[in-house]
Amino acid sequence: MAAKYQQIANEIRTKILNEEYPVGSVIPPELKLQESYQVSRHTIRQAIALLANEGFLRKEKGSGTYVDDRFKTKDASEKRTKTIGVITTYLSDYIFPSIIRGIEETLRENGYSLLLASTGNDLQQERKCLESMISQQVDGLIVEPTRSNQYNPNLSYYLSLKESGIPVVMINSHYEELDLPYISLDDVKAGFAATSFMLDQGIDQLALIVKIDDLQGKLRMKGFIEAFEKAKLMFDSANIFTYTTEEKQEVVARVVQRLLDETNTIKGIVCYNDEIANSLAQSLTASGKQIPEDFAIIGQDDSYLSTAGEIPLTTISHPKEQLGRDAAQWMIRAIDKKIISDNILYDPQVIERQSTKKNN
């Protein structure tokens, strides 16, 4: 039996084909349809999104939902400029401008337009972004998950998009609960590479600073543990410092306090990303410590922050623009050729700079 939204879409489609809703006319508003079918607003929006994707409807902001004529001929549908929605946690910070540049350039070269939104790593804002993308009838969606290591009440939106035939690909991470394709750095290998590099320098008293509301943190911590296991060494669980999006500044202060304690034995710190590594290096330097003589530090993502401070940071590579280009190409194949490609995982590389050193 078809889902409720599909049943509603079938009825509206029939009325359009029978010209009960003529081309150019406005269908009843969402509230009226809710009352008529005794369903939620979300179900009505699913039905409208499905019909919009098929070319039967188009939604004009502030005006209403109109019967379109794109369903009549294939050529008419092909002439419409296709729009790809892109939702990231941030737009102008850290590595995101490079990723977005890769997406935008590839889409433009192939005649696609781009619709951008950001969540600020906030679940409520993610819901608003998803609803906006659906109402604007995007042809596909590239998404960086929000708080991907926590339960997400917005998961049903992604299932609705999938059922409506709108392709979705995740970047940088993914939701483990959903069977959706993703393109990202291999974060387990990234955590393993960073930790192994430090252990190979003879620094076995290591701390880890890791973000726990995003899946990348969970996977990088797994790599940290695997590196110790492979080296047949023990790590001290008290030296693992976790934080969430809101605790970014607090965790650096907490780690610095621990490192400056006279009983401290930690000699190296594996950081979740370059932002944390850069902030830690600045705080330690301001406290009179030397990097790497007193503490060796390694970051992640090879962002501009890895070279922005007084001490260039050893870090782990991140493809950034390549990831953006690959995500755009994945989406173009999915829309134009109906090919759903496999996941893409990039192998990380250590980029050695001045924040680490070999022990003599």
Image: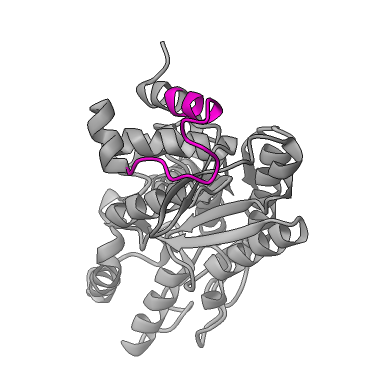
Q: Residue furthest top?
A: 1
On the question of residue 103 being in view, the answer is: yes
Percent of width and height locating residue 329: 71, 48
**Is 183 placed left or right of 293 in the picture?**
right
In this picture, is 208 found above or below 284? above
**Is 310 placed left or right of 102 in the picture?**
left
In this picture, is 246 found above or below 187? below
**Is 246 placed left or right of 291 in the picture?**
left
Percent of width and height locating residue 137: 51, 47
Q: Nearer the viewer, residue 313 or 26?
A: 26
Residue at 34% x, 89% y is 286
On the question of residue 217 being in view, the answer is: no
Percent of width and height locating residue 170: 52, 45
Provide the residue span drawn in magenta. 11-29
Residue at 64% x, 67% y is 101
Residue 344 in which image quadrant: top right
Q: Is residue 13 magenta?
A: yes
